[in-house]
Image (tube, grey):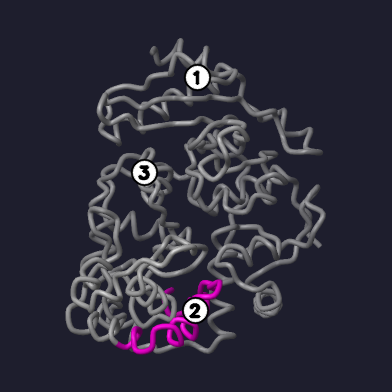
Amino acid sequence: MRTLTLAQARRVAVAAQGLDRARPAPVTTAHVRRTVERTGLLQIDSVNVLARAHLLPLFSRLGPYDVALLERATARPPRRLVETWGHEACYVPAKTYPLLLQTRRRWSGMGVETLESQHPGALAEVRAVVAESGPVTTREVERLLDARYAVRRGGWGWRWSVAKLALENLFDTGEITAAHRTAQFERAYDLTERVLPPAVLARGVPDPADASRELVRIAARAHGVASLRCLADYFRRPQATVRAAVADLVDAGELEPVRVHGWGRPAWLHVGARVPRRTRARALLAPFDPLVFERERLATLFGMHYRIGIYTPAAQRTHGYYVLPFLLGEHLVARVDLKADRPLGVLRVRTAYAEEPGAPGDAAALATWPGPGEVVTELAAELAVMAQWLGLGAVVVDPDAAGDLTGPLRAVVGG
């Protein structure tokens, strides 16, 4: 069985995500589409500390780009990308949508059956409104229906109205989906058959085993090298189902069983994965970037133990609120807490920390780990590119910014 070093596995992972490629100029809709086809998905989140979560992975791979290109691909027919429930709420290539019809949220006490028993007829009425008036937002549906469907429930979740619960259940079952997101980031729901391209609709719903194999194929290609846990996590699939798909793909010659030194668990290499001898990657990675989805993989390959500060109580945050790992070469060499201060027109650095060289048991990483001066210089350059993309005039290190890189970084960027 072939054995990969941790360094090789890191470079495979970086290359599989397209992070080592030269950034195109100008960026076109085709670049956006091909990038999402390579990563397999873009996780959607409403957090807008810098920019919407799904915009940042594209910036990491393409550099400055017009965000209207993504809107064009997701909101205008024929849609190349559509929203569905994958890793979480995600944009995926339209052809992937049918594969995910069985990847649904697991509701706690408010699934279809419960909703129908508590509010008989609500699903049918909401479905009829969408069919007649879609695309429609939740607020528009509430206005069009009897007032009782607009009442918020207490003591559960986000205090959704009955109309919202019906819409989300229909979204999860695939009967409706998002035709687009509004400027306020609300879903505008429509019947799925009016959103998906005709060619995708014509293929119908795939056999579950075929769908599982294809999802694992996409995840394996996006990882380059992966464990069973990695492959299952990418689209939130049951490990037993993924294990069967992996066996099929090994038999087909698409996955190769490998050992990764220091990983301590079975792994598979995608047949099309590149194993570069070096990588020149440089990118700030959003908390929802596919490279950092799976925290155990991140710790093993890159030596980074990472938590998203926005979901952590302030007193327990170790590195800040909206913290982005900084990729340089094959290593995650730093992490920075950033905020787009739009009223003042600056990109604020609120913390900046250097990482310890190498993953556990990876002494060879020291040979390729960049020096402190290079880390600061390259980080400052990438922050400047991000500020320009966000339409901000300068990068500023806050006076009270924490972290061992804040002083050196301030000396380069000012502030």
Q: Where's the C terminus, which quadrant?
A: top left
Instruction: Give the magenta part as a residue range.
Output: 96-124
What's the amino acid at mark 2? Gly
Other-residue count near label 2 (Cα within 10 Å), few / some / many at <14 / 14–19 / ≥20: some
Asked if the stretch drawn in magenta spans residue 208, the answer is: no
Q: Nearer the viewer, residue 335 or 115?
A: 115
The amino acid marked with disc number 1 is: Ala
- Describe the element under mark 3 as helix, strand or loop: loop
Q: Quadrant of residue 232?
A: bottom right
Residue 90 percent across, percent down from the top left? 43, 62
Q: Is residue 320 left or right of residue 255?
A: left
Circle 1 residues within 10 Å: few <14, some 14–19, many ≥20: some
- Closest to the camera, between mark 2 and mark 1, is 2
Q: Of the two numbered discs 3 and 2 on the same chain, state the one appearing first in sequence.
A: 3
Q: Which residue has dot 1 on it?
A: 401
Disc 3 residue type (three-letter): Asn
Residue at image x 60%, y 18%? Answer: 404
SS at badge 1? strand
Q: How many marks?
A: 3
- What's the mark number on residue 111? 2
Is 112 in the magenta?
Answer: yes
- How far, Cα to Cα, is label 2 from label 1? 45 Å
Picture quadrant where residue 83 is located: bottom left
Task: Give percent across and percent down for residue 217.
Answer: 57, 71
Q: Where is 326 relative to 108, above or below? A: above
Q: Residue visible at 52% across and 80% down?
A: 102
Instruction: Give the residue pinned by disc 3.
Output: 48
- Of labels 2 and 1, earlier in sequence is 2
